[in-house]
Image (cartoon, helix red, strand yellow):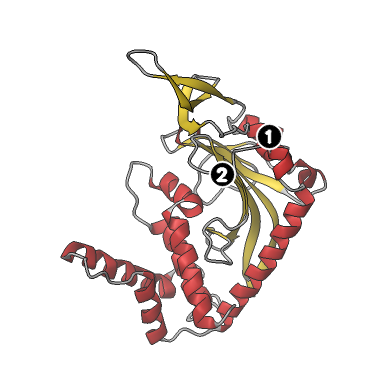
Amino acid sequence: MPAEVESMMYVGEVPWHGLGTYVGDNPVTSEEAIISAGLDWEVELQELRTAEDEILVPSHKAVVRTSDASVLGVVGNRYKPFQNKEIFTFLDDLVKDGSLRYHTAGSLRNGRKVWMLGKVGNAEIVPQDAIDKYLFCWTSHDGSGSTHVAFVSIRVVCMNTARVALTEASDAGIKIRHTGELQKKVESAREVLGFALDEFMSYENALKTLAEFKMSDSLAEQYVNLLFPDSPEEDKETSAHTIQMRDYILDLMTNGIGQKIPGVENTAYGAYNAVTEFITHHRMVRGSNPMERRFEASLLGAGNDLVQNAFGILRNMAGAQ
């Protein structure tokens, strides 16, 4: 695997990003997914010492992957590592009764981040335009973030992927800090699923409201101006890039995948899909593996932030509170 995605597996249909190793169509448990995704390794904390004098650094420790002795991060003394098998197994009860089906799992940036994505249902926003609903569970082993369970939608017609964002909080969902017992902090899988389905219902209703809200040319211009605002400190190059981004979104609002579906074109829902398509399929990223970078950005990085911002702007316009 190239640099961004260290290892990855998928079950069933090929993901939108086309990454990972196919492991069949049958449902898998978290243990099977962890092995197939190359996540069957553990981390431990080790003492830090200075290179020259071997002086102990008492305030911090190194997070080390035991399988290859690679250092994934440096953390404070209160940090408690969670193992990959701990993070995902609590969802297995949902797999057993068919409520959740693992779809993808993998490791990013040489093990610093790991994730698992499981499908929990679908919904139709307008006729012939469905979204699939997923639970997204991820953590970092480098000390950069908590363990999260969040909610993701994937628009079937074009595989646009977006974290569900019902508030302005970027960490919507369930967040568990690395400072205690994981199993004591996480809710039962059934409660997590119930919370997720409630969130999805609110998200689905918000998208349907956006689909009912017509976007005039002037509102479309206002939307992209809010999404990519001018800055008084912009130089000519930055200003040109801002204008280019606005034009790109405006073009996708007309010519993007699925925009001609009745009920999508010239609506706030279509405007939202233009941004999710841009982030998932078109956004320019640095590096030799743009699809991998887009995958990470759409769910964990700046791409997700832009999608959440677009959703908030459009909800305000449409009054979808």
Labels 1, 2: front one: 2
Q: Nearer the viewer, residue 140 or 221?
A: 140
Q: Is residue 25 left or right of residue 115?
A: right
Question: Pointer 2: residues within 10 angstroms few (<14), some, or many (20+)?
Answer: some
Q: Which residue is drawn at the image coordinates 50% and 33% (left, top)?
A: 76
Above or below for 21 versus 57: below
Give the image location of residue 14, x and y in percent.
57, 47
The amino acid on which the numbered mark 1 sits, given as a three-letter code, is Glu
Asked if one can make out residue 27 in the rendered structure from this viewpoint, the answer is: no
The quarter of the displayed image where residue 227 is located: bottom left
Q: Is residue 180 left or right of residue 100?
A: left
Q: Secondary structure at mark 1?
A: helix
Give the image location of residue 55, x and y in percent.
40, 16
Above or below for 114 versus 218: above
Q: Quadrant of the C terminus?
A: bottom right
* Residue beneath disc 1: 86
* Residue beneath disc 2: 146
Q: Residue furthest right?
A: 97
Q: Is residue 9 left or right of residue 223?
A: right
Question: Pointer 1: residues within 10 angstroms few (<14), some, or many (20+)?
Answer: few
Q: Residue furthest top?
A: 53
Q: Secondary structure at mark 2?
A: loop
Q: Nearer the viewer, residue 17 or 279?
A: 279
Q: Which residue is drawn at the image coordinates 77% and 53% (left, top)?
A: 191
Above or below for 128 versus 162: below
Q: How many marks?
A: 2
Q: Is residue 84 left or right of residue 234?
A: right
Asked if one can make out residue 219 in the rendered structure from this viewpoint, the answer is: yes
Kindly report the distance in space between the C-alpha atoms of the residues bearing marks 1 and 2.
14 Å
The amino acid on which the numbered mark 2 sits, given as a three-letter code, is Ser
Q: Which residue is drawn at the image coordinates 26% and 64% (left, top)?
A: 241
